[in-house]
Structures are given as structure tokens and as C-alpha cells.
Image (tube, coloured by chain):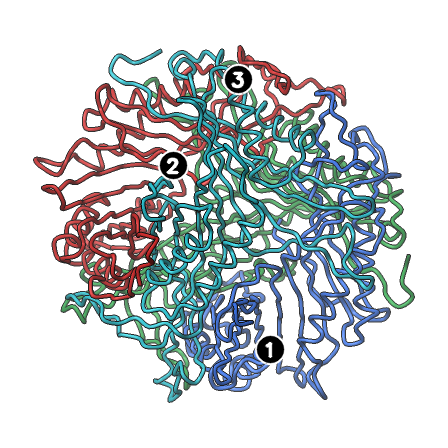
Chain colours: A red, B cyan, C blue, D green
Amino acid sequence: MASPITVLGQNQYGKAENRVVKITRDGGTHHIKDLNVSVALSGDLDEVHYSGSNAHVLPTDTTKNTVFAFAKEHGIRTAEDFGIALARHFVDSTEPITTARIRIEEYAWDRIATSGGDAPHSFVRNGGEIRTAQITYDSRDGGSLEVLGGLKGLTVLNSTDSEFWGYIKDRYTTLEEDYDRILATEVSAVWRHNWNGEGTPPDWDECYAGVRTLLLRAFAETYSLSLQQTLYEMGSQVIEGRDELDEIRFSMPNKHHFKADLKVFGIENEAADGAVYLAADRPYGLIEATVLRDGAQARIPVDMTNL
Amino acid sequence: MASPITVLGQNQYGKAENRVVKITRDGGTHHIKDLNVSVALSGDLDEVHYSGSNAHVLPTDTTKNTVFAFAKEHGIRTAEDFGIALARHFVDSTEPITTARIRIEEYAWDRIATSGGDAPHSFVRNGGEIRTAQITYDSRDGGSLEVLGGLKGLTVLNSTDSEFWGYIKDRYTTLEEDYDRILATEVSAVWRHNWNGEGTPPDWDECYAGVRTLLLRAFAETYSLSLQQTLYEMGSQVIEGRDELDEIRFSMPNKHHFKADLKVFGIENEAADGAVYLAADRPYGLIEATVLRDGAQARIPVDMTNL
Amino acid sequence: MASPITVLGQNQYGKAENRVVKITRDGGTHHIKDLNVSVALSGDLDEVHYSGSNAHVLPTDTTKNTVFAFAKEHGIRTAEDFGIALARHFVDSTEPITTARIRIEEYAWDRIATSGGDAPHSFVRNGGEIRTAQITYDSRDGGSLEVLGGLKGLTVLNSTDSEFWGYIKDRYTTLEEDYDRILATEVSAVWRHNWNGEGTPPDWDECYAGVRTLLLRAFAETYSLSLQQTLYEMGSQVIEGRDELDEIRFSMPNKHHFKADLKVFGIENEAADGAVYLAADRPYGLIEATVLRDGAQARIPVDMTNL
Amino acid sequence: MASPITVLGQNQYGKAENRVVKITRDGGTHHIKDLNVSVALSGDLDEVHYSGSNAHVLPTDTTKNTVFAFAKEHGIRTAEDFGIALARHFVDSTEPITTARIRIEEYAWDRIATSGGDAPHSFVRNGGEIRTAQITYDSRDGGSLEVLGGLKGLTVLNSTDSEFWGYIKDRYTTLEEDYDRILATEVSAVWRHNWNGEGTPPDWDECYAGVRTLLLRAFAETYSLSLQQTLYEMGSQVIEGRDELDEIRFSMPNKHHFKADLKVFGIENEAADGAVYLAADRPYGLIEATVLRDGAQARIPVDMTNL
């Protein structure tokens, strides 16, 4: 029962990590969508916490069933379309539920190349970055829909055109300035669409591909004096190049590559001659920032990592 | 340089996952502290993003050096004390830095039992839950200090005294009601101290041990009609039992144990007789909620997971 | 079909990682066994490879069902007993199958302490080492049974009584000799029982507990000049102390703890005064060896890691 | 010291997981090699185990230094060339060492596409399969050199052309026969070169690319009645197509995709119409086998997994 001195705050529940694969057949040619779908519902749920009454609870098992049934009934055109349909469904069809947040990871597959060309129904997993989407539908105050796109695991490296110098030096500073270093990071990014559910939605796939191209180009083409500068450049190019986006947030670890110290063996190891580096695991620099369209509000939560 | 149509939003940087181990010798008896320390600094940092000028940047490498030097200079009494010293140092000694957030994971070690009793300097890692702490010091507006305690990886299981029934049944509901099920979860919890840096700080170790005991007892002693009810009971008991805390947030996956269907082999498999269960990985129910002291403000961020 | 120039070599198949949990009720007091069971079968299986004929194949799905059914029908006294029953069953009841290898991981749970003493049916996962077992039953040549016990994830640390010096120094050697270092490792060990299936089997639980105690004591009580010496001492004490074992193999990474270099900050950091260490991830020394009872044959495969 | 009743068996030691990155500059165009190198040495090493004497021990730290120094002094043409040079060096230059085994993982990077074409010194990690190599040099008995190539993490899926029926049905069999199922696996493969160190070595890169192509094609083009049949076909095509190889071993989990049961909702979900599948984690079928050139000896160890 409700404690006399405590109250319930924000709460949500649902089934996480539903691994749904949909094959679509177009004659002998098949297409594949491979998603990991997580559902989180909120609403009039005080009683299930206070007394254990489940009268307002749609079981997480049901939310799982719905994900698989919707994949067949409605198909999966894009992760975003699928998430919007699910979010609206849970809120519109379940009276106590006022908010649904659908998070999706999408794994890409390429066709296998055979002697006769691209295979019609054979695929090899593309192990690159994971595409993400988050759809939040809230029925209160007239209803609102927010769609976040994103990616994670996009690992990139510039083997030159990166410097780091001119920083604060205090008692504990030992780092030497570097005028030619490796800059490497594993990009996690989340971007916010300004589409609010009314009118024509963006072309989700075209937008994703466009953002990915802008991120890679900005990383490759920025002569970098700091990872922060590179990050901001990446964010700016995305906001400038994609009118449908108002905000982007990054979490970018500095994947350190330390030049091996070979002087003691009488071996030169200069960047200019092609050097050998030790790729370090921990600790790592971690750079996180939001880039906004001028005048837009920041709505993407600041915490994208747990450490 | 700054783009004409974009602006920088929230940003932070620092060295993450500094793995620092401190041995303290008391004659032949040694003590060990084993931490993973992550530093995040914020402040007047626009220029490093806009132009790459590092004039306001204390290198992440320096923050790493500081962690190790402080461990020797000041010792590590508790993770919380250590984090407070670090947070104050970065802000107070580095002019452009106004906010420091220190996150710490602590790994526990037990003494090895030998023929002659507990070993004086030999340890075995206690693989149970990880203790966490987050210290945030902000020098603006007169200065504020916030300390969050926490734990993760505390996996618990009740083999009975758990039911689940009386829920909403829609078109996609197939789950059967259950009057005797296993309830298992891996508890992640974060709690907020109301101490603000003035006056005597709490006894951090005693508080941690006390919260852990309350969480385990509440889990064990609650006859559960829903995981939400158990969660709320755990949170309430912590807030009621620990005056120094105002808020606690949980992320608790429902680690499903499905009764194996053996009827087809002519084998009964009822909970009452001691049953066999399949421990499932994915998908899983995920229950998240905050419990607050009445009148307190919710300040712990809602997002504790990325899925 | 069979290729004219290739032949099939060793092969095996089965269902891996069946996560089976068995609750046994003794009135209000419950007991829990939590296993991860992997089945691998071999025998007259050429045709399934050459032509795809499954006439000799017991489906992996059936081996899964059998694991869960046996857990209820026969109970799980120990992982070893359970594995022996499964291995004999698959070979004895399936004509083309001549060999069955059952691998088991066991996860330990402790009772939760409540205000009224140890809880009767509430448990907290003991996150320490994982107990392992491998049972191989081969019906050919009169039948043979081999039982391997083991553990993994037993992480131990001596904060002194470890030296390293007197080694070979070549052109690439820069390591300084150390007369007081931390010695830490994560023990993986596999031991072989000389019981062959006839006569009274060992007391599996007593043996496991005994080996674990010997391993920990030998680690703690050995003044170490090399990790190899410590490893050999651990193995010898196990073979000397447990008549039922003939062989033990170890894989022990040297979990390096490097003394932080604080001299540049004017801070002493000597082991004798209690030092600060950086716990490193990669690379790590890796020490692997077998210790045998004099006259026994080495049968445990050399490869316990993939790197 | 040596125990009176135990003896030392097979043993080896070295530094594992040296993460070495080599950049080669060709004017403004850079090339990258990204390896994870593990060293294991054996030889006259009894005393370090029995008494802790390190007189015959080249420190693992030295083996690490050697990896980085060799990367600069000799460059890294291929993982195999680099491993051969290292293995020969350790054995030939260190008197007590008679055998060296070098294991290498290689991570692939692609050039980033920019507006001006492929970037000259900007790369994006190709997250697909990991290339592996193992080089063993043994100076005893006149000297022998063995080179294993391999890959892991190559995940493939056929969305049709897979059946499974005609298997043994016992008391515990519930699986229904399936005439149109998804077949998916994550290929781990190790192949053995018949080159023994004399004469011209194979073109390692060309061989790797050739094997990968054969594996993918055989997977895509085999109409499958069992995963074993597909595995054998993959192995046969590699042995038939690559004269330089005598043996290949596979470990292939059956990544189950279960058709979602939607009948209860009145929804058809037939493979022929494009179905929805649940991608399962555990348990999974695990198929392992060796394919040999007729007359060749099996030398690749059977154990490629720990479960």
C-alpha cells in the first residue's frame, strides 16, 4: 500500500528487446528487416505500485505479442513507421496508458554476391553501425509525437590532420603537445525531427542515409584541433544540411592511439614516416555535446551513457 | 568556427573509466580499494567547439593524472569522499570549469580464508553487485553539491510468493494468470542524499550497507502481486528507513523464468511440487520508477538504460 | 553429396546453453539449482553431412527437451550427476549416437538474510566464480566415462609477497625488476577425475569445495617469484590433496597492476608505503599449464582460450 | 619446488592481446593495419614452475615490446607474414624457447567516401567478420612451421531453401518438420595451409579473399536439408577450390528464427507469404565439424568454443 511518507514519481514499464525479423517476398526476391524493439508505457499506474492491482496494466507479454502481430499485419516499412504505429496503438487502445515510448535498434544485412550476381534470398550481416529510432507518443494536452533518429557503433579514424595543443597546464599535466596525431572515435548520435505528427512525415530512410553521409564527410574533412571541434562540425553540417532536424546530440569517446615508444630500441617512430600505435582500451576521453538549430529547444536527454 | 544557424547546447568532457586500485598497509595487514572513476567537466567551453581553441581545456589526460595523484595524496576513504575531493578540485582550481561530475564504480574484495585465518594481504573478488556513486559540484549560484549513491548487478529471486493476474486483456493477450510464479530481477538503483555539502556528511559506508539490507529484505518479505509493487515497497522502505535520502530510482528487468512445458511427455511440472524453469534472456519486462520522500523534488534522470 | 576429394573429420552437434533452473520444495524451504547445459553428440553421422539425410539425427530441439524433462524426472543432485544421466541417456537410447559430451556451468545463489534469519525461498545471486563440469560418455570399446570438474572467473589478488626478477634481457627488454609487486589473476581451471564410471563415484560437491579451498590457500600462501610458480603450487596442492584427481589445467591471465608514476608530481608511490596502481586491461600476460599426478596421462585439451 | 608426486605437463606463456595499429604513408595516401596479436612461448621452462627461477624466461613485457618494434622495423604486409617473423624471432633468438605460437585477429577498415572521392587518410571500421591467423613455429626435429587462416563473426542468413525433416523421433521429440525455414548462422572457421615454410609462401590476402568468397557462395547456393550439409558443402568447396589448404574446421551455431505464432490472433504467418520471426538467443543448436582433403591429417584442434 502507499507509504504515508513516500510518493511515486516517474514510472514506465514494458517489454524490452523484442527481436523481430520480417521477411518480405517479392516473387523469388526476398527483403529482410531485423529489429530490436523495446516498449515503455506510462499513464495512470499508481495503483499497481501501491497495491499491486493490475487492473490498469496491459501485460508486457501482450506488448511483445503486439510487436510481432503488427509486423505481420502492418509490415515494417521503416523502423520509424513501425514505431509510430505501435506507439499510437498502445495509447489509443489502452485507456489508462497516456504515453508510449518505442525504442528500436536496426541491424543491416547485405545481399551475398554469388557467381550469378546478388543472391535473391541470401544475406550477410553488415557489422557496421546500428541504426536507432525512438518514437514517443503522448496523448495528453492534445497529443504530441516526437521522433528521434540515431546511430551507434560508427567507428572512424583519421590518421593525420589532427593536432592537440595550447591547453591549460596545471600541476598534474604531463601530456606533450601533438601536431600530428591519430583521431579516432566511435560515434553515438541521436537527432530530433521537427515533424510533430501532422502533415507529411519525412522520408526516414533518405534522412538516415543523408545524416550518415554528412557525419562521415564532416569527420573526414575537418582539420581537427580538438575532438570537440570535430564534433561541433559534424553536428553543424547535419543541422545545416537537413531542414527536418532541429537538434543532434553526440557521445564520442576519444579512442586513444598512443605512438609506441621505440626510441629506447634505437628505432624512430614518427607520424610523418608512418608510425606504430598502441590502441588503448581504458581510460578514454569522453566528449559529449548537443548542437541545436538556432532558436530550437534542447529536448534530447543529456545522458547517453552510464559511465 | 561557429555556424551561422546552429548553436552549441549542453556539453561536457573528461576522462572516463580510470581504473585505480589503492593498497593501504597497516603493518602486515593490507586494505584494498578498487574503483573505476569517470570525470566529466563543463563550463566556459564554447570556443573549443567553435574554433578548436584549447585555451580553456584542461586535458582529459590531466584529469586522469589527478585521479591517481589524489588517490595517493588524499587516500580513498570512500568513493563518495574521493569523488567530492576530485569534483571540488577541478572546479576550484580551473577557472573556466564551473561544474564537475564524478562517477565511480566500486568493486568489492573479500579476504581469502587460509588455514591460519583470514589472509592479511590476499583477496578474492566478490562478484556480487557493483556499488556506484555520482558526485556533482557546481560552483554557480553560490555552489551546490549533489551526491547519488547506488548499486547495479544485484540479482535476486523469490521462488514463490509472487502472483500475476487481474490485468487488462486485449486482442493480443495470451498470457495466462499465474498464482505461484518465480519473481527474479537484477536491481539497478540510484538514491539521492539530501546532504548539500554543508554540515556533517553522512556515513557513506554505513548508508550503503543499510540501503542494501533494506532492499534485500523488502524484496524477500514482500508478497508480490506485481514487480511494480515490489519495486515500490523496496523504495519506500529505503526512504522511510534512511532519513538522509530523499529519492530513489530503480531499473528492474523482469528476468523471466518460464515453467517448462512437460505435459506433452506426461510429466507434471507444478510450482507447488518444485518445478523446472527455463531462464529466458530476451525479451524481458522492464520496470522503472522513482520513489520520493513526500515533498521532495525528483532530480535523478529518468534514463538509466539505453534500451 | 560427398565430394570426391574431401572427407569428413571429427564432428559433433547438439543444443548449447540450455538455461535450466530447478526449484526443490522442502515444505516452506526451497532449494535452487541454476545451470547452463550444453549437449554435443557424435556417432554415425556422415550421411547428414554428405546428403542431408537426417535419419540418424536426434534433433537438437529434442536434446533441449530432454534436459528440461530430466531435470524434473530425475532432479539435479549435482551438475555431475545430472550430466552423467544425460550423457548415458543420449548414447544408450539413440542407436547412431556413440559419444555424448555434456558441458555445464553452474551459478551459485545465497539465501537473503532477513530480520527473521535466512529467507526460506528468497535468494541473491552469488556473483563469484562459475563452477563447471564436463561429462563425456563413449560407448565404443566397452564404454568409457570421463568427468572433468572446473571453475572460471575466480579473481584473486596478493598485494605483496610477489617478486619478478632474474629473467632474460634481450634488445627489446625494458621491464624493471620488481621485488614487491601486486600479483592478480582470474583463475580458470579444469581438473580430471580418475573415476571411470565403475564403483562409487566421488562426492562431487565435497570435491569441488575442497579444490576451491586448496586453490585459494595455495594462491594466498605462496611467496611468488613468478606466476608460473604460483600456478604450479596451486596445481600440486590440488593433486596432492585430492586422490580422486589425476590432472589439472590452468589458464591464468596476469592481471597487471602498474604502479602509478607520480614522481613527476613530487609524490612518492612505493609499495612499502601502500601504493596506487593502474589496473590495466590489455595486453596481459597469459600463463597456461597442466599439472599431472606422476604417471598419469594428460587428457585435458591444451586450448582453454581462443586468444 | 617440484612436488614429489606431481609433474608439469604442457605449458606456455606470453603476452596476449597486443593491440597494434600501423599507419603506412604513401605521400598523402595512408594505409592502415589494425591487429590484435597474442604470443605464446614454450620450451625449457620447468624451473620457472618448480622453483620460480626466471633464468629461462623472456618476460611477457618483452614479447609485447617486440610486437610493436617489429611492426615498425619490418612493417606488416599481412598478419601471416608478421606472425611468421615474430614466431621465428622468439624461437631463434631465445635459447630456451623451442616453440612460438602467434595468434592474430585483424580488423578491417574502409575508406570514407567524401565529396572528392575516397578519403586519403580517413577510415570507417568495417564491422563485419574478423580475420584470424595462427602461426606456430617449432624448432625441434628439424623445425616446422604451421599456418592457420580463419575468420569469425561472419553472420549469414538464407530466408528460404532450407528444410528439416526425416529425423529421429523419440519420447522427447516435439519439433515439427519444416519444409521452408530460415537458416542462419555465425560462421567461425579455421583452415590449415599445407605450406610448411619452405619454398614460396601462399598469397595470404588472395587466399583469404578467395576462401571468404567460396564460403559465402556455398552458403547461398546450397539448398539445405540440414545445417551439417551446408557446413560440409562450404568446407568441400574451400578444399576443392584452394589447393594450398588441406583442412578446414567450422563452429556454426544455428541462430534460430522461430516463426511467430499468430494464429491465435487470427493472423496467418506462413513462410510462403513472407513471415515474421522471433530471433532467439539461447539455447541454440551448435554444429562443429572438420572437412579434410582426402589423405590429409587432421591437425586443427577440435575445441573452438568453451561451451
Q: In the rendered structure, which amino acid carries the disc numbered 2?
A: Asp
Residue A259: x, y in percent?
Answer: 62, 23
Q: Is residue A17 visible?
A: no
Q: Is residue C75 above or below residue D73?
A: below
Q: Is residue B88 above or below residue D269?
A: above
Q: Check disc 2: other Cα within 10 Å, few if <14, some if 14-19, many if 20+.
A: some
The reply, left or right, for residue C113 in relation to residue D4 is left
Q: Nearer the viewer, residue C90 or D220?
A: C90
**Label 1 SS:** loop
Q: Nearer the viewer, residue D48 or B207?
A: B207
Q: Check disc 3: other Cα within 10 Å, few if <14, some if 14-19, many if 20+.
A: some
Mark 1 sits on what residue? C78
- Rounded to the nearest whole Å, what is the CA distance between mark 1 and mark 3? 60 Å
- Rounded to the nearest whole Å, what is the CA distance between mark 2 and mark 1? 45 Å
Q: Are marks 1 and 3 in contact (CB under 8 Å)?
A: no
**Label 2 SS:** loop
Mark 3 sits on what residue? B94
Q: Are marks 2 and 1 in contact (CB under 8 Å)?
A: no
Q: Is residue B228 visible?
A: yes
Residue B89: x, y in percent?
Answer: 56, 24
Residue C2, labelled with which disc? Answer: none
Residue A303, labelled with which disc? Answer: 2
Q: Are marks 2 and 3 in contact (CB under 8 Å)?
A: no
- Residue drawn at x 65%, y 35% is D82
